[in-house]
Image (spheres, rainbow, N blue to C red):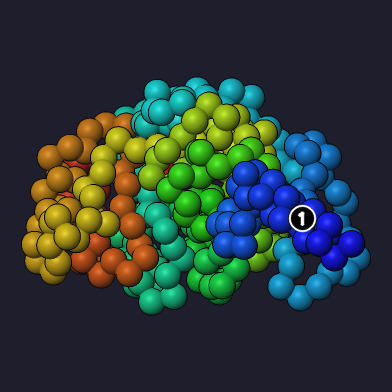
Amino acid sequence: MPRRRAVVAAALTSFLAGCGVTGRPVTRWAAPQPVPAPGAIPSPSPSRSPGVPAPLTPQAPVPHPGGGNGPAGALRLTGSDAIALTFDDGPDPQYTPQLLAVLKQYDVQVTFSMIGSRIRDYPDVVRQVVAEGHNVASHSWQHLMDLDRHPWPYQNWDLRNTMAWFQTVVPDTPMSYFRAPGGNFTPELVQLAGSLGMQSLFWDVDPEDWDAPKWGHGSAMVDHIVSVVKATTRPGSIILSHDRVRPDTIAAYKILLPWLKDHFRIVRLP
């Protein structure tokens, strides 16, 4: 009998190995928390655990979410002769307030594309951004550059969780835009964002202020940002920049904002 059990155990081990089941750990994307299907958002509960966002409040779907001329129909231009400034990857507890001070000095309102986990971690900065009249767009929960290749259940959880945290931090404030990390839009992502009331947002001008290995630090990066924005901005441009750990970007916009105001009408995206 012991010999028979040993034979069975050996056969089972061989079978599992053939199926790819071994003792080594397998890396997989973390399973999202269960989320309701679009249109089946639960009502707010009277109490919730600390650190958990309130249930998502539905926003009106975007009727034609792919109505732009960027990737998968994302917006590339403002649709008028005015230009719009956008700043990604925040909020940053040190540099976002510094940028806000420069924007206030020149009376310019912009759109901040924020990462959901940072909205959760730095709520006071988010409230300051909104209080000073700026827009907040979703930049996904954790800035996965391959978000477009993740399964739909994860994408759905990611966008909904980001919006739920934003609504928890600043209730009754719309999150009207979504910018995919890296601008990696797909028709499915654009449609999902639209079902949550967000227009997908691309850009027309990219000074690559994120690429310090290529363009350098300090005055080299400042000069690069200024020259690219001045050379490529046109009526209707949406300009991409970043506010997370970007002192050179802030220095560049101290130069650019008066120049841009002299040459263009700057608007906050509606």
Out of 8 and 269, give the one closest to the viewer: 8
Give residue 241's position: percent from left, percent from top.
Answer: 31, 52
Look at 17% across and 37% down and name the residue there.
Answer: 232
Q: Is residue 165 left or right of residue 130?
A: right
Whether residue 66 can be seen here: yes
- Camera sees residue 127: no
In front here: 100 or 95? Answer: 95
Looking at the image, residue 114 sits to the left or right of residue 216; the answer is right
Name the residue located 46 percent from the left edge and 26 percent from the top edge: 72
Q: Mark 1 highlights which residue?
A: 7
Q: State the residue at coordinates (28%, 66%).
A: 246
Residue 61 vertical position relative to residue 155 in the rendered view, above or below: above
Q: Position of residue 221 (x, y in %)?
A: 14, 60
Residue 54 picture location, percent across and down: 77, 61
| Quarter the N terminus occupies | bottom right
* Residue 76 pos. (x, y %): 37, 31
Q: Residue at x 69, y 46 (%)?
A: 15
> Dot 1, how many residues are within 10 Å of its Cα: few (below 14), some (14-19), or many (20+)?
few
Left or right of 156? Residue 24 is: left
Figure quadrant of residue 45? bottom right
Identified by mark 1, the residue type is Val
